[in-house]
Amino acid sequence: MRERPSIESLLELFADGKVSAAARLITILEDGGKDAERVLDSIFQRTGNAYRIGFTGPPGAGKSSLLNRVTAKFRAKDHRVGIIAIDPTSPFTGGAFLGDRIRMQAHSEDPDVFVRSLASRGSLGGISNCTDEVVDLMDAFGKDLVLIETVGVGQSELEISEKAHTVVVVLVPESGDGIQAMKAGLMEIGDIFVMNKADHEDAEGAAREIQDTLRLKDIPEGEWEPKVVLTSAREETGIDDLIDVIEEHRRHLDEGGRFANMRKKILRSRVRNALMDRMERRLRASDKVRELLEQRMESVYRGEMSPYMVVRELEELVSIQ
Ligand SMILES: Nc1nc2c(ncn2[C@@H]2O[C@H](COP(=O)(O)OP(=O)(O)OP(=O)(O)O)[C@@H](O)[C@H]2O)c(=O)[nH]1
Ligand SMILES: [Mg+2]
């Protein structure tokens, strides 16, 4: 068996722009733990340049097909593109992985396009635990655009809006997608709504429906008004319009310090989430905490202690000053 390269040597190769080293570092980030932290610590200073665009929407809406088209356009504009496809691991939607791979093969020879699939945390789709870290790695690797594809289900849509600067919601003119989108909370998070499969006849009507729904939103003066774009990834129509609107949204964020504020907000929530995670893991791992908790719970059951009395005592035990 070949010896595994050390993290240091991988980081050196990574700094030299070696794709294979970047891919291995992503695997380390996926595995989490101390090694993942070391990787992140060492690349973090080189991050902060990538613009992140999230593509979310129901399964099969054409997100991957669209990403493929959009990537070609961005490459023509000399952007270096990272693509993260978060694949549901559910057997019902299985095959997405292979599908994405095949659709992305158009760019597989291009050294300035870096594609990576990550397994999603939930079985239906959503976000992967290490999405932020992998975005950072692509950013540090010199990609100035990172496109993130997630299936919009459950909580994931809220999470993508915490990770992407521009959120593109991809819908199709089939089976009341618009209504589904509203239910799933997608209407709240989209900066841009794409009605894909515009080669279907109901597309224009469906796009108008979305537009009408968006008009009901109360948008403060000067804030971004979500836009609707009709595309066909299959027939390659509307892609330029989509790029234009994405760039328009980016310019909007650049004005008045919005982008800088958003960046701070994203970083703040990352630190907070990481801290909460760490604290929770520490609490769960501590035998002392568990023992005391079990003992005191008996007193709570008997009505001798209130829940807050227990919490105060536990707080003292794990005091972190
Ligand atoms: N007619 C038509 N079909 C399309 C269009 N875009 C994508 N498709 C087809 O729709 C199917 C799903 O496309 P994908 O790009 O895999 O959709 P997705 O949203 O990435 O799917 P998941 O990742 O599985 O959620 C494929 O068979 C595509 O060929 C389009 O504009 N028009
Ligand atoms: Mg896909």
Image (tube, grey):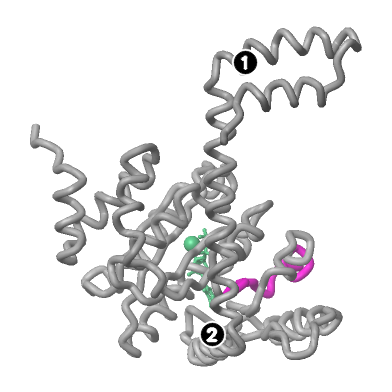
Q: Amino acid type of disc 1?
A: Arg
Q: Residue at x 63, y 62 (%)?
A: 58
Q: Classify residue 238 by image quadrant.
A: bottom right
Find the residue positioned furthest to the right: 303
Q: Secondary structure at mark 1?
A: helix
x and y, in percent, of residue 18 in the image: 17, 62
Q: Earlier in the sequence, mark 2 or mark 1?
A: 2
- In this rendered view, identify the residue nearer to me: 170 or 226: 226
x and y, in percent, of residue 280 in the image: 59, 33
Above/below status of 266 relative to 98: below
Image quadrant containing the N terminus: top left
Image quadrant containing the C terminus: top right
**Callout 2: CB less than 8 Å from ligand 1:** no
Q: Amino acid type of disc 2?
A: Arg
Q: Which mark is residue 256?
A: none
The reply to whether the magenta stretch includes residue 175 is yes
Q: Secondary structure at mark 2?
A: helix
Q: Which mark is residue 290?
A: 1
Number of residues whose C-alpha sits closer than 10 Å to that of mark 2, classed few (under 14), some (14–19) or many (20 or more): some
Boundaries of the magenta span:
166-180
Q: Which residue position is annotated with label 2?
A: 250
- In this rendered view, identify the residue nearer to me: 21 or 198: 21
- In this rendered view, identify the residue nearer to me: 308 or 254: 308
**Callout 1: CB less than 8 Å from ligand 1:** no
